[in-house]
Amino acid sequence: MKKVLIVMACAFFSFSSVQAQSNKEDVDLIQAAFGKDKKDLVSQYMTVSAKDSAAFWKLYDEYETRRKALGKERIKIIENYANHYDDLTEAKAAELSRAALANDGKYVKLHSEYFEKFAKTIGGKSAAKLFQLETYLQTIVKAHVMDQIPFIGELDKSKVEGAQ
């Protein structure tokens, strides 16, 4: 199952990194595509009884709406970093770091809140399974994004090395 998830995630992220623009429409398009693909993955991965299915999917859609909002916030932070990369000050670097950490904290809070809701709906083991998948996918997303973003000072260093 992990191999299938990795292939699907890589295909999506390759597309999304090329398509990622600063305008809201592109962000919505990317997240809509990911949401659909992700829902298919969750549907294949999770085994939800017929009696719990309607409640599970209603809760899942509610969770995804909130997760996508946090994703948009994260994209804005990354765009802000990209827009200020060449003139990154101490204050701006600290501001962006605080924003990224706050966003991570919001994800943890969201996961904690919804884990409890899913546990009540589908049981603790199934909720753990769902959030194991969720954590796995978000880790892939973060790793891919981090791979696309230069470290602070990395481009400056390559300019100096290229001039020598």
Image: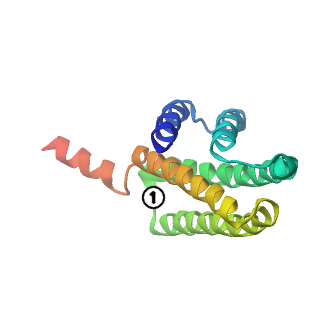
Badge 1: residue crowd in 10 Å (few <14, some 14–19, many ≥20): some
* Coordinates of residue 4 in the picture (x, y in percent): 50, 37
In front of the other: 68 or 123: 123
In front of the other: 92 or 43: 43
In front of the other: 24 or 57: 57
Tell me which residue sits at (47%, 40%) in the image: 6
Split into 4 quadrants, where in the image is the C terminus?
top left
Q: Is residue 11 above or below residue 88?
A: above
Tell me which residue sits at (56%, 68%) in the image: 101
In front of the other: 53 or 21: 53
Tell me which residue sits at (82%, 54%) in the image: 59
* Coordinates of residue 66 in the picture (x, y in percent): 76, 54
* Coordinates of residue 3 in the picture (x, y in percent): 45, 40
39 sits left or right of 156 in the view:
right
* Coordinates of residue 128 in the picture (x, y in percent): 64, 63
153 sits left or right of 66 in the view:
left
Q: How many numbered marks have been drawn onto this rendered protein structure?
A: 1
Q: Is residue 44 above or below residue 99?
A: above
125 sits left or right of 100 in the view:
right
The residue tagged with tag 1: helix, strand or loop?
A: loop
Q: How is the image coloured?
A: rainbow
Q: Amino acid at mark 1?
A: Leu
Displayed quadrant of residue 153: bottom left
From the image, tell me which residue sits under label 1: 88
Tell me which residue sits at (70%, 67%) in the image: 124
Q: Is residue 90 above or below residue 2?
A: below
145 sits left or right of 113 in the view:
left
